[in-house]
Amino acid sequence: MAEILCLCAHPDRAHSRVSARLMDALATTPFPPGKLALRDLYRLYPDYAIDIEAEQQALAQARLVIWLHPIHWYGMPALMKLWLDEVFSYGWAYGPGGHALQGKDLWLLLSTGGAEAAYSPQGHHRHAFQDFLLPYEQTARLCGLRLLPPQVLHGAHRADDETIAQHVREAVQHLLSYPHWCGSQRAEQEELPAGERPVEAKA
Ligand SMILES: Cc1cc2nc3c(=O)[nH]c(=O)nc-3n(C[C@H](O)[C@H](O)[C@H](O)COP(=O)(O)O)c2cc1C
């Protein structure tokens, strides 16, 4: 149980250059007791049988939730998506009585194979990278999470060791100084009116 809960999802950690180094750094940095807990989803759930209660308990204690993963097909890896489907449940994360995540911070620690310039209207991916984060933004909003500006390492395949090391150092420094680091960065998010929540609206 910790103030910062980092959910890591990489289906092939042995071949990861970025996520694995972030996970290793977070695991070995001497954070104060109770500051940070890491949950490596592919190690915890190789059979995809997620312990929903354990995940919700870990979330309930946290003030900052991190999703650390490579971008796969413009979104999150499969187990992270299953985790979201099952753990952010109706009546717990959203819907009537679903206030468990209200007011917590959410931070994305991401990497892409595509270079930053490829994420533009003229580029290979045809849209700004931020456009692909729309589902994350709306998920956060629906659950009352405050989405912090993400930290993204683009062009991961071609990134040299120093670039990756700098990315890792920056992330660790941010977390060591949490909550002060993000105090000025939180996006203003009003609570979604009850009737606008999709499931309630259907009922
Ligand atoms: C199945 C799969 C899908 C991917 N989809 C994308 C994508 O949509 N956009 C992108 O920029 N990179 C994509 N990539 C590249 C990964 O984002 C990149 O390899 C990763 O961020 C590097 O981090 P790592 O060293 O931790 O693996 C994909 C890679 C795989 C294996």
Image (tube, grey):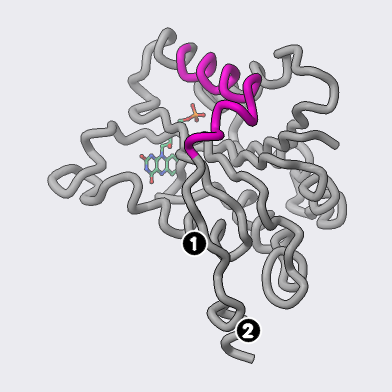
Is residue 5 visible from the viewing direction of this image?
yes
Give the residue drawn at x 41%, y 57%: 134
Q: Quadrant of ligand 1?
A: top left
Q: Nearer the viewer, residue 86 or 78?
A: 86
Q: Amino acid at mark 1?
A: Gln
Give the residue drawn at x 42%, y 8%: 162
* Up-down relation of residue 102 to residue 112 (above or below): below
Say which element carries label 1.
helix
Dividing the picture into quarters, in which one does residue 81 lie? bottom right
Image position, residue 1 (x, y; %): 85, 37
Residue 182 belongs to the span the image colors magenta: yes
Numbered label attached to residue 138: 1
Say which element carries label 2.
helix
The outermost residue toward the top is 162
Image position, residue 102 (x, y; %): 68, 57
Q: Amino acid at mark 2?
A: Glu
Q: Give the residues in magenta.
A: 166-185
Q: Nearer the viewer, residue 54 or 11?
A: 54
Q: Residues within 10 Å of mark 2 (few under 14, many from 20)?
A: few
Q: Which residue is mark 2?
A: 200
Asked if residue 81 lies left or right of residue 166, the reply is: right
Image position, residue 77 (x, y; %): 55, 47
* Up-down relation of residue 181 to residue 3 (above or below): above
Asked if residue 122 lies left or right of residue 84, the reply is: left
Image position, residue 189 (x, y; %): 51, 57
* Up-down relation of residue 101 to residue 7 (above or below): below
